[in-house]
Image: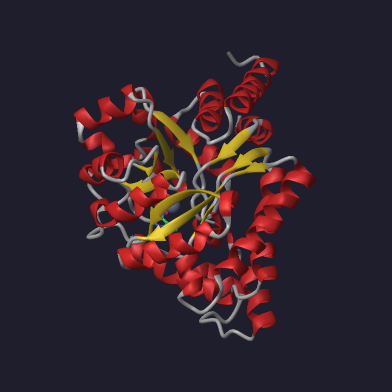
């Protein structure tokens, strides 16, 4: 059964909508880039790095995630990082991706905004040409830095036109409510950027409300704590607001105690438009397929549930309507061909 489940998920056409490119930095590449750029790492070996990936909460992960980013310096480094993810995505039949990157993590270290975007974009364009993987790049503001720093980052982004399609909000959530970023998100919306935000990962349901009503978020990243507020859950379901859920991440960061207690199934039962994603796969022990499989095994999801989740991933994307419909049809055809309906 396990093999059947995995091979079904592997072949399923999928979109990934919650993926931090910096969170795809595998220890092997981290060591290669450290050598290339003469950067010292706090780990003796690849194996020791992996062993250090034990987290007690979001902040304990972020400390290692930002430290790992120190090896990313040149345009080619950002290209290599993005390309490694795309190779993996192609193997997992990911047809579309809307990755995040955290420009401030790099500009704060003196790396130019353009170096980061150009490296990432060149790889995304090559990914479309080589694998047919479409993409929409989203720039995330770090909510534990100042709103002024976010505003300056938005100014940088404007020079790169439509290559960046959206803005998001990530990093340490508790104590950094969406309301702090009202002005910069207003400016981003005015400039035509799509808007998403991390909310309700460690933060309370009120942060999800703030993301919707103050920032104008069209999609909520994580959002798992919405179930604590019935009115909010009903509203999210009624308005078909997509929630990009990351099961392995939630277990590894102790947002939930165990996969068997993950709210994904309850969220689906509540009529929410949920999608499955990998967040920071190099740190959380699994890419997209592993997230589908781990959730399915622990929560008893059927193949039909998995096909519904894959279809939702396209519906929740920023692809144009005809492409979204075409991709959804591919999911249905795949499910039909496997006797799943
Ligand atoms: N940055 C990278 N991964 C994140 C997560 N899971 N939550 C908030 N910020 C992040
Ligand atoms: Zn995230």
Placement of 154 over or under 137, stated as above or below: below
Q: Nearer the viewer, residue 130 or 285?
A: 130
Q: Residue at x 45, y 68 (%)?
A: 104
Q: Is residue 148 above or below residue 263?
A: below
Q: Position of residue 5 (x, y in %)?
A: 61, 31
Residue 55 sits above or below residue 334 on the image: below
Residue appearing at x 59%, y 84% in the figure: 39
Residue 150 at x, y = what percent? 38, 63
Image quarter in which the C terminus is found: top right
- Tell me if 98 is positioned left or right of 92 in this view: left
* Image location of residue 11, percent across then percent down: 69, 32
Ligand 1: which quarter?
bottom left
Q: Is residue 52 visible?
A: no
The residue under the point 56% across, 57% down is: 21
Whether residue 203 appears in this view of the structure is: yes
141 horizontally vs 8: left or right: left
State which quarter of the image contains the N terminus: top right
Q: Is residue 44 left or right of residue 54?
A: right
Q: Quadrant of residue 97?
A: top right
- Closer to the camera, 149 or 68? 149
Counting from the top left corner in percent of width and height, residue 87 is at 72, 51
Residue 180 sits in quarter: bottom left
Residue farthest toward the right in the current orientation of the protein: 130
Q: In the picture shown, does residue 14 fall above or below 135? A: above
Total marks in image: 0
Protein image colouring: secondary structure
């Amino acid at each position: 059964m396990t093999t059947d489940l995995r091979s079904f998920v592997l072949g399923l056409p999928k979109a990934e909508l919650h993926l931090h490119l910096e969170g795809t930095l595998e220890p092997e590449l981290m060591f290669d880039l450290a050598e290339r750029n003469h950067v010292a790492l706090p780990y003796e070996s690849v194996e020791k790095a992996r062993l250090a990936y034990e987290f007690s909460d979001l902040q304990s992960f972020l400390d290692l995630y930002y430290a790992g980013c120190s090896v990313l310096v040149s345009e080619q480094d950002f290209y290599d990082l993005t390309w490694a993810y795309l190779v993996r995505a192609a193997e997992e039949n990911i047809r579309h991706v809307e990755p995040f990157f955290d420009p401030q993590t790099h500009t704060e270290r003196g790396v130019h905004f353009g170096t980061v975007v150009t490296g990432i974009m060149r790889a995304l364009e090559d990914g479309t040409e080589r694998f047919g993987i479409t993409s929409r790049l989203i720039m995330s503001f770090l909510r534990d830095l100042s709103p002024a720093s976010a505003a300056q980052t938005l100014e940088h982004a404007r020079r790169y036109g439509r290559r960046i399609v959206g803005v998001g909000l990530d990093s340490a959530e508790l104590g950094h409510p969406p309301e702090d970023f009202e002005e910069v998100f207003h400016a981003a919306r005015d400039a035509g950027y799509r808007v998403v935000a991390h909310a309700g990962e460690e933060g309370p349901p009120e942060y999800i409300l703030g993301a919707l009503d103050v920032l104008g978020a069209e999609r909520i990243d994580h959002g798992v704590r919405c179930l604590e507020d019935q009115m909010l859950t009903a509203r999210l379901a009624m308005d078909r607001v997509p929630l990009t859920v990351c099961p392995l991440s939630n277990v590894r960061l102790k947002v939930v105690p165990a996969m068997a207690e993950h709210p994904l199934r309850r969220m689906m039962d509540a009529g929410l438009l949920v999608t499955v994603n990998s967040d920071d796969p190099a740190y959380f022990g699994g890419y997209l397929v592993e997230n589908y499989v781990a959730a399915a095994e622990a929560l008893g999801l059927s193949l039909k549930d998995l096909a519904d989740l894959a279809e939702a991933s396209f519906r929740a994307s920023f692809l144009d309507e005809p492409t979204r419909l075409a991709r959804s049809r591919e999911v249905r055809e795949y499910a039909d061909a496997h006797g799943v309906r």
